[in-house]
Amino acid sequence: MSKRDYYEVLGVSKSSTEREIKKAYKKLAMKYHPDRTQGDKGMEEKFKEIQEAHEILTDEQKRGAYDQYGHAAFDQSRGGHGGGNGDFGDIFGDVFGDIFGGGRQGGGRSRARSGSDLRYNLDLSLEEAVKGKEVEIRVPTLVECEPCDGSGAKKGSSAKTCSTCHGNGQVQMRQGFFAVQQTCPTCNGKGKVISEPCSPCRGQGRVEETKTLSVKIPPGVDTGDRIRLSGEGEAGEQGAPSGDLYVQVQVREHDIFQRDGNNLYCEVPLSFTTAALGGDIEVPTLNGKVKLKVNPETQTGRMFRLRGKGVKSVRSSSIGDLMCKVVIETPVKLSSKQKELLEEFEKSMSDSPQKHRPKEQGFFDGVKKFFDDLTN
């Protein structure tokens, strides 16, 4: 299948400057990046085509060969012009390295470094994490210099081919019979030098700035989850791609609930009389109070499950449960009358302790048997 014209792919003319080509590339790369197209194979192929066109048209030697010979300049089967098989390897090594996270190793002109990834720690309440929200964050970072469009060259000028290495990024040093290839000391391996650097960024193509971003937090996030904002990290050197920003979620401790996956847990104090006689009590949920029926003779530590009152995880559609552990509260600051009533109540139970307090009676019976066994 015949390839499309590289200028047509980027939507630029043959007379476009390198800065204009890079600007067009960035706009298209953001649109068709695999992170945004969610595995669409057609869009991935489009992205590769954009990468390939950018790689050719921003290299002075390759662009010259392409303008003269077209795609044949890089056709392995025909030997080609302007570098032949070597150029073919340079192009596709860089293209696939960018997409799949690798990178071409070895000689040749080094590329401007991509921007670093950044991390932002975001504190959320449990309610915010469960329900989701949109937050604004302020991130100190390096952004593309506007006056030079990230090129590092003063407006109206451009980077020139390095006269020391002639754009190769490498120089050869001979010592007797040996030849040693090393990074060009003039351009630091970039193949180009900026004779008139941009003043605001001092030729780096980026400046320090604190930018404000709006981040949509999906419902159900939890501590340890992170949200990736593609291209919102540090800007790359001299027009290279930007890094990514990772928003790291940390959910604060809650006064009432503890979260474990999709389930919520809480302790509910229960009066002595309600535990003994049974009744209805109110328990909290993240959406308000609900009634819970407590059976007579409920013991402390009993766990009640309220189905569907937990959390919907960001990774699944199922909703967890609310687990309520009842803790019987011993009355405090009793009046004389109340103490008398309790003493009378205790006497009424002393005739049949095994019937009314089976756990207590069973425990002490076990203790007695333990000591009897020791003495026998």
Image: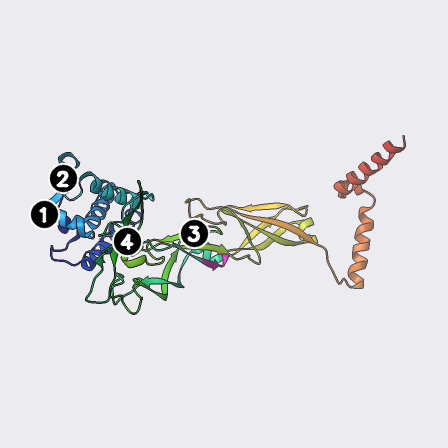
SS at mark 4 in the image: loop
Q: Residue furthest bottom?
A: 199
- Label 1 and label 2: CA atoms lie apart by 11 Å
- Label 3 and label 4: CA atoms lie apart by 35 Å
> In the image, is residue 298 above or below residue 375?
below
Mark 1 or mark 2: whose residue is earlier in sequence: 1
Say if mark 3 contacts mark 1, CB within 8 Å. Answer: no
Q: Position of residue 268 (x, y in %)?
A: 62, 53
Mark 3 or mark 4: whose residue is earlier in sequence: 4
Where, quadrant-wise, is the N terminus in this rendering? top left
Q: Which residue is mark 2?
A: 80
Inspect the image, locate mark 4, and give the three-letter code of the amino acid beneath it: Lys
Say if mark 3 contacts mark 4, CB within 8 Å. Answer: no
Is 145 placed left or right of 265 in the picture?
left
Q: Which residue is mark 3?
A: 226
Question: In front: 138, or 148?
Answer: 148
Residue 123 covered by magenta stretch: yes
Where, quadrant-wise, is the C terminus in this rendering? top right
Is 104 placed left or right of 332 in the picture?
left
Q: Is residue 287 visible?
A: no
- Label 4 and label 2: CA atoms lie apart by 25 Å
What colour scheme has been applied to the protein in the rendered image?
rainbow
Say if mark 4 contacts mark 2, CB within 8 Å. Answer: no
